[in-house]
Amino acid sequence: MAVVASVGTLTEELITAVAKPDRINDPRFKSLKRRAEATLRSNAHPRTDQFAVAKQLEGLQEKFQVLDKDDLADALRLRLVELEEHRSSWFPEILSLLLQLANRPAQYSTVDRLERVAPKPEAKGLSWSDIDPAGTAYCDDDIWESVDYGASSSEDDLTSLSSDRDEPRTRPQSSVAPEEDYVISEDVFSSGEDEDLVASIKSAQFWREEKHADGLQQDGISSRVITELQMVRETISMLQGLPTSLFWRLDDSIEVDRRYTLAHLSNGVLVALLRELCSTGAKIDTLRRFSQTSQSIAYMQTFHRRIDAILGGFDAYLSRIESRYLSRNLEVTVSLLQLCQDVRQESKLLLLLAEVVSQFRSGSNEPIKCLDLLYDEVCGLQAAGDDAEFMSLAELFFACFETYARPIRLWMEAGLLEDSSEKSFFIHKSRSDSDLRTLWQDWYSLDDASGLVNAPKFIRPLVHKIFITGKSMVFLRHLNAYDGDVGTPRKTSLALEDVFSDSQSARYLPFYMLFESAFGKIVDQNHSLTSALLRQELDKRCGLWVSLQALECIYFGRDMSVFSPIDNKIFDLIDRGKGAWRDRYLLTDVAQSALSALPFIDPSRLIVRTNEAHSPRDQASSSRSVSMLDMIAFDYVLPWPIANIITKPAILRYQRIAIFLMQIRRAKHTIVQQYARHAADRTVQHNAHSLSYALHHNMLWFLNTLYSHLTDFVISTSTLALQKSLSAAEDVTAMIDAHNAYLSSLEAQLLLSANLAPLLQATTSLLDLSISFANLQYIRHSSSIKPARQKRPHNTEDDDTSDESEPESEFESDDDDTEIENNRRIALHDTLYDQRLRDTKDQFHRLVGFLAAGLKGIGRVDGQLSWEMLAEKLDWRREARSAVV
């Protein structure tokens, strides 16, 4: 309220001074006051920012320096420094006001206009001339005389007086005596030693030769009797790794100096005790030497630190024993036998570790052998019922295993490998990791070639699951489906409490069963969770089932209403002798146009490739064989996630199956087309016509039976089995194995396996025989109308419609010449045609019989039901047709 009243008073004074109203009670005065107060209330400005003012002043100094006015900058800086000595809360407002009132200081300000600051007069120092201008001070002779510090003593007054009379006054020639004349008396110094203490120390040093000058002789050896306390202290020092006089270190062993004995103990018993202690000390020295070596592998560093800690605890225990022996406040019985018993009990863990270190240091695979040996020792201690040492060694084992399992956790959680553990881990990263289509097969590999030497034996049964889990995480990261949290929290670490729970029953189970069960649960949990997520991504986002459906239509011709135009185009071009049937651009365009009607096929991913490795002469010679179709290959480019499951070798197997099915369709197409063209021809003799008709019927039956069996039974049932296997597969590796098993089964049932090569050759010969029979029929029926065709003019309507304005290749001209010559020979020899038919019939029945017998034979050996079914079909039809023909 006081502030408001003060502001109101100041406002009235301001209005009175500026507006000069007639009186205070005037309405105009009240209106002005009300408006002024409203303005003040709405414009409450804060305090000036002192840092902004300081920044403006610094900027002004820099501006002076840039404009080559260093004198102004120095003058401003000096005054600001001086202003700092007189602090005030209003300085920021004052300086801000001055800066706002300044009118281009860099242009109009000069140093000459500033008031010169007079320098402060320096205080004049005091000199000897001011104190003693005459120079007579301190010139008396008495000032240099020797001082008698005892003169003030009342007891020596008379002595002092007599001394003053008898002895003359002397003045020193120099303040310091020369070094060669200054001799210090030996009486001045004291040794500072306690002679009794020194004597007791010397008497305690039993190893001095003079202590045993009159030693006894035992078995020709000088015997030196020492106290049991001395022997106990020497033993403790030996166990702590210190040099002693009683024990000698020779290489990796410790020997006893048998010259020293105890008066109250027989030599045999003493030697036995000391040898046991020497054996313990030698084994502990093995650990001490190991602790002095450097380790580069992480879990070996953990093992190294734990051994140092255990050694430190053992040394502290020995020091406590020695301190009890040396304490004057405690009455302790010194006993070497008790010390041996205490050391035996306390060094159990150290002796076990010494055995472990000795074994793995002598092996080739030291680091992993260390974990294996620790695991075996833990299992052995539990089996022996040594619970105390078992728990201690189990803690050490789990500490080392936790460090070893850190790369495993990182691999299973994020699909990453530590650079530092690349050489000590059983999973290695390949250098060729650029093609995502080979991510699952080629990017990472297990160390199988060396027998998984970097994996402990107790986790080797789970190595493949660990490997698959990490690869699944890599897969998910590249699918952008992993954000660091794949759902429910996962456990990837294993501690001693996880293996040995509080339940009493768990302690009676073997350690290896408990450990393998606990670690296996962790691996299985991570594996199932990661694999399930990846399976979900492959099914929903990557289109696994759509890709399988597309492959079935492209390679197996599941929908022939869509695939028939492709076959017809290729077969027509071959029949007309056109070289365009090998044009991959034309075939690709035809295939993409035909298969674009199916919604689950992406036509842009379909490519038809042709093999141009054969020479034109080889191609011409094989033009009447189904093997010419081997030059065509349909290639469907899968998305990279699906390409990791259906690999490039699998696509090659698909292509082989597709060509085999196309060869069957090619033979059937030739038979059907030949019969459709010449079914009404009656120029052939009745017997020959009947035989050709029977052959046509048998061949068509064989082709239909073979193709329907392969597609309707073999491929259909195998594809259904594949779908069930993929649905039940627990990870990508299982899916790949299921798909490879599916293709292997198809190849075996379609006679495309390497061990079924004779049966495949017989089937191919039957297909070629069908084409040869169709060509024979074509030549025979064409011979009767060939002369009429030669008399026709070349530019007839029939020629125009049949040729379709396509240029004939050199193969067509060669084939026409051959056909004309064959026609003339066959036209002259009708009996040759009949003989060719009978030869074809005999060859057909022989090949079908061989195929049926072969299928029965391998069916009995390998147990493939499809082979026996096909053999029965071929036998039944063959016997029925043989009776007719």
Image (cartoon, grey):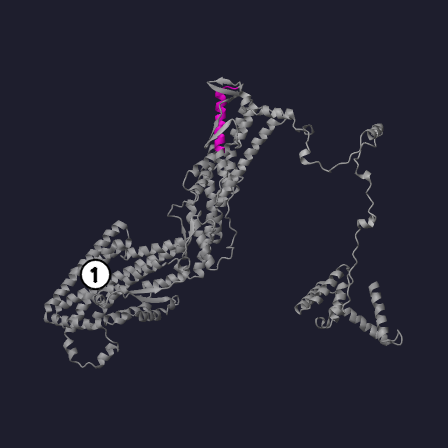
Query: Is residue 556 toward the left or the right of residue 17 in the image?
Result: left
In the image, residue 491 above or below residue 662: above
Q: Is residue 57 magenta?
A: no
Query: Is residue 296 toward the left or the right of residue 49 in the image?
Result: left
Residue kind at label 1, given as amino acid type: Ser
Give the image location of residue 584, x and y in percent.
31, 69
Query: Is residue 498 toward the left or the right of residue 151 in the image?
Result: left
Residue extent of the magenta highlight:
265-284
Q: Which residue is mark 1?
A: 765
- Residue 860 visible? The answer is yes
Query: Is residue 773 toward the left or the right of residue 93 in the image?
Result: left
Image quadrant occupied by the C terminus: bottom left
Image quadrant occupied by the N terminus: bottom right
* Mark 1 residue element: helix
In the image, residue 795 above or below residue 443: below
| Magenta segment main secondary structure | helix
Q: Is residue 274 magenta?
A: yes
